[in-house]
Amino acid sequence: MKLDILAFGAHPDDIELSCAGTLAKEVANGKKVGIVDLTRGELGTRGTEKTRDEEAKDAAAILGVSIRENLGFADGFFINDKTHQLEVIRMIRKYQPEIVICNAIHDRHIDHGKASQLVSDACFLSGLTKIETQAEGELQEKWRPKQVYHYIQWKNITPEIIVDITGFEDTKMKSVLAYKTQFFNPESKEPQTPISSKNFSDSILYRARDLGRLIGVEYAEGFTADRHIAVDSLFDLR
């Protein structure tokens, strides 16, 4: 299956928190969108691998994405090396996306920056003919996405691109809250974490509102880019 957009996240819920509104909007526009999680988030303080798997499945259904896969890398310990790059390359060549979206270029969680560079490097390497990969016993064709964008996570990185997600903010929040073990729940007996507070849950929408304010809309999500953004005309810009 060829996809228009393939979004990568170091952990299940990275994508929902950061670019779910954009993905839901593109699905509504008829684009084929997929998600690949690098790890199962097994080192997370709250929940288990099993609950995260179930929550990721529920979130994918809410967003209406075409596929969701998990590469099973070691949470906290995966690295940007040949072995891991080849696994990401296989996903890129399998789905041949026009656009790849991945983790923030640097962030509080060490996996986010690592995943960002790993996926970005793999996108370049995926376009090299002499790197051979196989899927189901057959050689894959080379493929390089046209663009690689990085979403914004814990840190307030200045965006280079801001996408209007007005009308999709509720879908975004529903996909986030599908991760019932991870976020604010006053009845939970599990340990508190930086993302389990009410303030954090509230911040998801007030960040989206603030990014929306910058471009004159109600809600938005921000991204940085690996390459310069090209347009045919200045009038293409809002």
Image: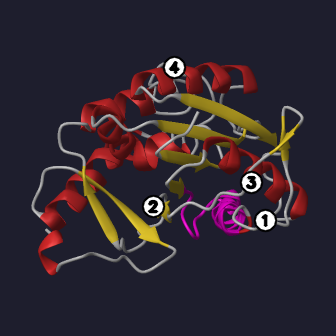
Q: Position of residue 32 (x, y in %)?
A: 44, 36
Residue at figure coordinates x 63%, y 27% from the top left: 190
What residue did someone put label 1 on? Answer: 129
Residue at figure coordinates x 55%, y 39% from the top left: 2
Amino acid carrying mark 3 in the image: Ile
What residue did someone put label 3 on? Answer: 89
Q: Nearer the viewer, residue 98 or 224?
A: 98
Q: Which residues are magenta?
A: 102-124
Label 3 neighbour load within 10 Å: few <14, some 14-19, many 20+: many
Q: Main secondary structure of the magenta part?
A: helix
* First in residue order: circle 4 vs circle 3: 4
* First in residue order: circle 4 vs circle 1: 4
Label 4 neighbour load within 10 Å: few <14, some 14-19, many 20+: some
Q: Is residue 194 above or below residue 116?
A: above
Q: Nearer the viewer, mark 2 or mark 1?
A: 1
Q: Nearer the viewer, residue 17 or 83?
A: 83
What residue did someone put label 2 on? Answer: 152
- Label 2: element kind: loop
